[in-house]
Amino acid sequence: MIFDEELRWLEGTWVAEFVRVTPWVYSSLEIVHLLGLALLVGPAALFDLRLLGFGRGAVSVVVAARQLLPVARAGFALAAVSGVAMFMAGAREVAVTGAAPVKLALLVVAGLNITLFHFGVYRRVSAWDGDRRAPAAARAAGAVSLLTWTGVVACGRLIAYT
């Protein structure tokens, strides 16, 4: 297996050991992970839908970003920390599932999409925000975000079954 040595090292860390052997830790991390995903994906999906034109007359993209994205960032932090801790506890077993590499690839795509959006079309938001239709690049970023985060959630669930 590729990265077998690194994965074995991860499983040997005190964090992985703590998660594996301490009662209720793994199941508690699953709860935190799901809460983090809800806080991430819910607001992110609402923001993406706004980019796609929903609620155009009701709320500006800037206001939507100001209200929704801090919650999504907090959700990402919870999901990332809890997800890494759960992964460390059984890294070799998780890494060989068919869904894990796909989930990781989708996380990379989501991160690139966010970066390109914020350092690209969002820098000129004042020129297109309001009642006007968002530019194609903003709409594409919203669509890619919706698809990738849906895929991340689906792959996360499939890890338990593949």
Image (tube, rainbow, N blue to C red):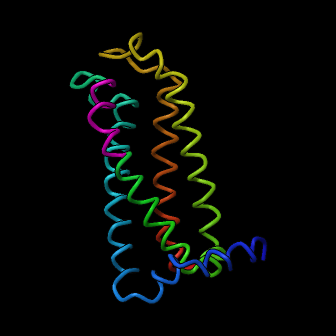
- In which quadrant is the C terminus drawn? bottom right
Q: Is residue 74 left or right of residue 95?
A: left
In the rendered image, which quarter is residue 133 located in? top left
In the rendered image, which quarter is residue 96 located in? bottom right
Bounds of the magenta span?
Answer: 61-72
Q: Position of residue 153 (x, y in %)?
A: 45, 61
Q: Is residue 55 left or right of residue 82?
A: left
In the rendered image, which quarter is residue 37 located in? bottom left
The residue drawn where x is 47% and y is 29% is: 139
Above/below status of 54 relative to 109: above
The residue drawn where x is 38% and y is 66% is: 33
The residue drawn where x is 26% and y is 29% is: 55
Q: Position of residue 42 (x, y in %)?
A: 32, 49
Above/below status of 74 relative to 52: below
From the image, give the main secondary structure of the stretch colored magenta.
Answer: helix
The residue drawn where x is 52% and y is 32% is: 140
Q: Is residue 41 left or right of residue 139?
A: left
Q: Position of residue 117 (x, y in %)?
A: 52, 30
**162 within the magenta span:** no
